[in-house]
Amino acid sequence: MNDIDKGLLKQVADIDGELEGAYNIRKDGKGIERKVTENVNIVSKSDVSGIDIFVKENTKFEIVHIPVIITESGLKDVVYNDFYIGKNANVVIVAGCGIHNDHHKDSQHDGIHRFFLEEGAKVKYIEKHYGEGNGTGKRILNPVTEVTLQKGATLEMETVQIRGVDSTIRTTRGNLGEDTNLVISEKIMTDGQQYAETIFEVNLNGNNSSTHVTSRSVATGDSKQKFVSKVYGNTKCFGHVECDAIIKEHGKVISVPEITANDMEANLIHEAAIGKIAGEQIIKLMTLGLSEKEAEEEIIQGFLK
């Protein structure tokens, strides 16, 4: 790997040097490095491009890295990754994609990830997206995540769009069984002419299932964002969706909530707040010696933490 590759891996997966645990690194549509462990096996698919990740039951506190990097302009990469998490396992999975594009053709990565968590399993899933390069070609990322949780399983999902992504449609679907919990934290920043759309669709099917979705976003320049959330309470359950956005310059944000209670014991909440940076916040920071631009950046970074 060259310096560009290493820089992308650092941005999207915090990889800096030797990796421990299981991992699979994909570059320009092909796997380039892989390691498995006693408890985590990674197998290439035979019918489509992608991998199957198998985590043994009762596996505790292992970390699995599966980052993707693209440096080839004009490449459209599609990958299908399935995760099979055994009973009572507890693992961290670090994904993410970084695109470096210095030319005029568009580069695109569509990652379709499916999670199947057995009874009592716990997963923390971290996914970061990042784009860079001086070319006019767009950097496009369209992730799809599908989650199936068996009794007592928990999945915590952290997604971050750092910067440099021209277009993204992010789709997350969940089907939750009894006593399960799906927690999603999303952070997105767009600038210039960039566009980002997020679609959440969660079915609370099991008794005492729950989901908590939090979206924090900043739209600057002439960028546009759209947040769509659909939560279906089909039994005794709890769902909470929160969308907070800051608009700067000519940025635009649309929030489209849809909560459907199909059971009298379904408890569903949706909250949305969209606004600009408060002037008094900027003034307060400027009194500490920051310029107006520095004050705005400080507020934005604090909001996205």
Image (cartoon, grey):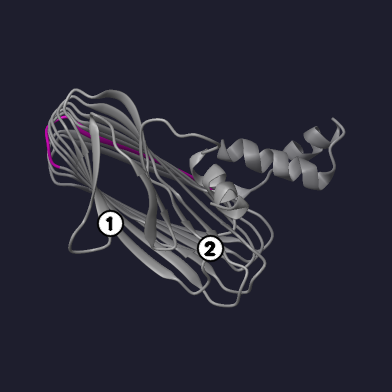
Residue 169 sits in quarter = bottom left
Residue topped by disc 1: 50
Q: Position of residue 209 (x, y in %)?
A: 19, 33
Q: Are marks 1 and 2 in contact (CB under 8 Å)?
A: no
Q: Say few, some or many: other residues with alpha carbon within 10 Å of mark 1 (under 14 / 14 to 19 / 20 or more).
A: many
125 shown above or below 173: above
Outermost residue toward the bottom in this view: 104
Q: Element type at marker 2?
A: loop
> Magenta segment: does it hold 216?
yes
Residue topped by disc 2: 71
Q: Amino acid at mark 2?
A: Thr
Q: In the displayed structure, does residue 17 sit left or right of residue 33?
A: right
**Whether residue 21 is visible:** yes
> Magenta segment: does it hold 6?
no
Q: Position of residue 200 (x, y in %)?
A: 32, 52
Q: Residue at x 56, y 45 (%)?
A: 11
Q: Residue at x 87, y 33 (%)?
A: 289
Q: Amino acid at mark 1?
A: Gly
102 shown above or below 86: below
* The one of 166 and 6 positioned closer to us in this rendering: 6
Q: Which residues are magenta?
A: 205-217
Q: In the displayed structure, does residue 248 sit left or right of residue 199?
A: right
